[in-house]
Amino acid sequence: MSEASGAIGSGSATQTRQYSTFRVADMFMGIELTRVQELLRYQEMTSVPLAPRAIEGLINLRGQIVTALDVRRILGLPAVASEESLPMMYRSRLPCRCRKTFQRNRGS
């Protein structure tokens, strides 16, 4: 994970945004830092039977149950050999804009 920033706007009214960046397969992606609460290392997950394929499982984050999503599955990419080497990103109050993606990938 790394940090990148970009300017939005024109002239003197430029607004700067910062991003936490990462790679998924050969894609370079980023999430605005204001939406990232913390970065986590991989940890054991509890699987959720009958959950959409994008849901990797549930983790216990200091006593709070958090849903772990697999971005590779959301994008329809093949799994990687060792998931333990992958970092995890935690975002609080994530609006669910992925509902259609979950439904589309659920059967695959």
Image (spheres, rainbow, N blue to C red):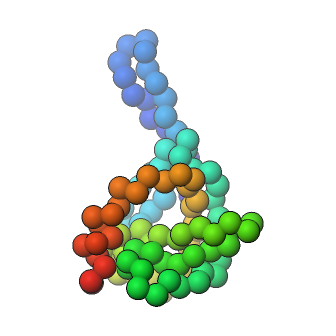
Viewer-closest of 101 and 1: 101
The answer, for residue 32, to whether it is visible in the render is yes
Determine which quarter of the picture holds residue 100. Answer: bottom left
Relative side of 11 to 33, left or right: left
Viewer-closest of 31 and 98: 98
Relative side of 64 to 24, left or right: right
The answer, for residue 85, to whether it is visible in the render is no
Q: Which residue corresponds to the image point at 44% horizontal and 62% vertical from the top-left?
A: 23
Residue 89 image position (x, y, % from top left): 57, 61
Q: Which residue corresponds to the image point at 73% horizontal and 68% vertical from the top-left?
A: 63
Residue 88 image position (x, y, % from top left): 57, 66
Q: Quadrant of the N terminus?
A: bottom right
Given the current orientation, which residue lies at the most extreme right position? Answer: 62
Q: Which residue corresponds to the image point at 40% horizontal and 57% vertical from the top-left?
A: 96
Viewer-closest of 65 and 69: 65
Residue 102 image position (x, y, % from top left): 33, 70
Given the current orientation, which residue lies at the most extreme front position? Answer: 50
- Total marks in image: 0
Q: Quadrant of the C terminus?
A: bottom left
Q: Which residue corresponds to the image point at 43% horizontal and 29% vertical from the top-left?
A: 7
- For residue 11, above or below residue 68: above
Residue 19 image position (x, y, % from top left): 50, 44
